[in-house]
Image (cartoon, rainbow, N blue to C red):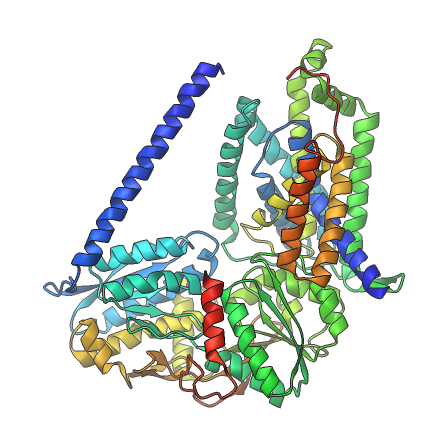
Amino acid sequence: MSEKKRQSRLTAYAAIGAAGTLVLSACGARAGEEDAAVAESCVDTDGDTIKIGFINSQSGNMAISETTVNDVLHMAADQINEDGGVNGYELEIVEEDGQSEPATFAERSEYLLTQECVAAVFGGWTSASRQAMLPVFENNNGLLFYPTQYEGLESSENVFYSGATTNQQILPALEYLKEEEEIESLYLVGSDYVFPRTANMLIQQWAEENDVEILGEDYTPLGSTDFSTIANTVAASDADAVFNTLNGESNVAFFSQFDDAGLTAEEMPVMSVSIAEEEVDGIGPALLDGHLTSWNYYQTLEDPENEEFVAAFQETYGEDRVTSDVMQSSYNSLFLWAAMAEEAGSFDVDEIREVADGTSIDAPEGEVTVDGETQHVTKTPRIGVINSDGLIDPIWEGELTDPDPYLEDYQWADDEEAAEYAEEAED
Amino acid sequence: MDVVLSQLVAGISVGSILLLAAIGLALTFGQMGVINMAHGEFIMIGAYVAFVMQGLFGSGVSLLVAIPAAFLVGGIFGVVLEQILIRHMYHRPLDTLLATFGVGLILQQLARDLFGAPAVQVSNPPWLSGSVQILGTNVPLTRLFILLLVVAVVAGLAALMAYTSLGRRIRATVLNRNLAETSGISTRWTDRTTFFIGSGLAGVAGVTVTLIGATSPTMGTSYIVDAFLVVVAGGIGRIKGAVIAAFSLGILQAFIEYSTTASIAKFIVLIAVVAFLQLRPQGLVSVQTRSLA
């Protein structure tokens, strides 16, 4: 190509780029103005439908997990509509793709609240996406239902947290390891981001109080596939158990190389808090057989609500599909919102918040009750052992536990330190 | 001593993975100067070939069938890409970069549509479970297998370049394309063949990484950066450079990681490579070319 032609082509690209930026900044300005203007909610209750928003990543690296949440949310909405809707209104769903990008979550949720005027939004998975959406919901007095188990230390008036906080998942896991497996030492392995780092900080504080020795704490970059060094150090440490907060595909590499290093579930069980039924299949049940997980829900739970839930899900999406903790929490969140709106007799955010405390539903995981103060829900901690069929059998069940996101009932927990830490990690 | 040995073994196995991921790139980028961002997706294709073969032949034999099959499939994808896209963009490296990045995204989506977004499971053959004792440290059989495979691939490639007429044609084209053409070498055919071999080797790398990591549509992205790092540090145009660079980076990574953390090790290795390239921009081993371009 001649130099001149190349030049003109480059200029054209630059022009397109500049135009794009202009359009974007124009959008930004518009959104900014609206921020100040929106005081009253614009939710439309004139017709016989009410709009709600689903925001899940349909693309990007989180699509793997978040599409399953989207499936189950649709199922919940269909079930509610079949039963006559909420306050006599049929649910109308507006869907947005978070694209696995926190900034997109913020932008699309603002669109849902201010343009589509939805009554409530369901979704988000990573802590980063939740934190990005937080100011949007607070500024517009919206309502977000966040389904994932997370690192705690948060309680926003505009968010209902239907997943577990630390005292409903991580602490029970530690308690189980100490009481039932009688461990004296522990090795921590996690992905390098806010959830594992905050969780491990709490684990360190717990360990000090409970005379459990932490023999090592290792982090790998998200998506890392090399664990040969970590497998070596874990093997050499001779710890009684491993506490695993790795995320996503790193788990495949970790368990494969853990196995390569000659380590077994009998000698050194791995307790995982991010591996549910959906992930077991990709890692391979053979590598996971006998290892432990900590969740509030397993597909194998034997109560009528769960059997109904699993049957309905598999009928809609296929016999080979599995149900997991986060999916179940998402499913619950829609019913919790419906129950609160019915109780309030309105879709107004303030009125819903007022009646929230004590709202209860019979969920697949058992009875779930909203705590009005923290806007989290009660949960039953359950330890499971992964079986060779790729499902998880519950082997231990704790008491129904009230949410305590700031660990105020735990003397040893220095949550200020952890909160500072979480904030730093976020930056 | 134990630590030194076990980390040395860990470093060599990291290095062998790096080298496998990079060796195909050393051909397409190193020899031909094509920045193929879809190289990682060719690795992914190889991994899915292993998955499909496992379904056809059952775990065990399937690995041995998968290696040649993945070479073929990866190679065919490479030739098709070269034929319809890259050959129109020789001498426009930046356009190639963007276009092949796009192709990579398309291939990822294709894998998602065909096999689903979640990772699929490729189980290790029974004859590769367990480990052997070498010099007092445990070496997993999978790692040993990967190392032996790398040695075989590098030896095969070196022999091809040194002793066959195809190798001579490739080298002639790299050294001076115009003169090679004048001497009656079909550089078009040579380019296509080089691309076939380079992409095929990415496919082979894909089969082997199923032994240690996840098989998912986006898996290629975790190898592509390291692969480029190895080729650039090793020096463009020489397989020998890639070999030395891969094992040095692997061993460096393993030792730093042992005394610090994985994140810091990655960071230090990257800084080390950047610093090294400041001192020696042409990389470890460089080719003296007489071409005018």
Q: Quadrant of the C terminus of chain A?
A: bottom left
**Tally of numbered discs:** 0
Is any part of residue A276 visible from this angle? Answer: no
Estimate the x, y position of residue A305 in percent, counting from the top left.
Answer: 38, 81
Drawn side of residue A168 relative to residue A220, left or right:
left
Query: Who is closer to the viewer here, A102 or B74?
Result: A102
Drawn side of residue A74 relative to residue B86, left or right:
left
Question: What residue sits 57% from the left and 23% below the top?
Answer: B90
Question: What residue sits 64% from the left and 47% below the top?
Answer: B270
Drawn side of residue A83 relative to residue B261, left or right:
left
The image quadrant that residue A150 belongs to is: bottom left
Is any part of residue A145 visible from this angle? Answer: yes
- Is the residue A185 above or below the residue A107 in the image? below
The image quadrant that residue A260 belongs to is: bottom right
Residue furthest toward the right? B135
Estimate the x, y position of residue B196 in percent, counting from the top left.
Answer: 66, 31
Estimate the x, y position of residue B83 in percent, counting from the top left.
Answer: 57, 26
- Is the residue A257 above or below the residue B106 in the image? below
- Is the residue B28 above or below the residue A284 in the image? above
Question: What residue sits 88% from the left and 65% below the top?
Answer: B136
Residue furthest toward the left? A46
- Is the residue B214 above or below the residue B36 in the image? below
The image quadrant that residue B58 belongs to is: bottom right
Query: Who is closer to the viewer here, B109 or A38?
Result: A38
Estimate the x, y position of residue A198 in percent, counting from the top left.
Answer: 51, 71
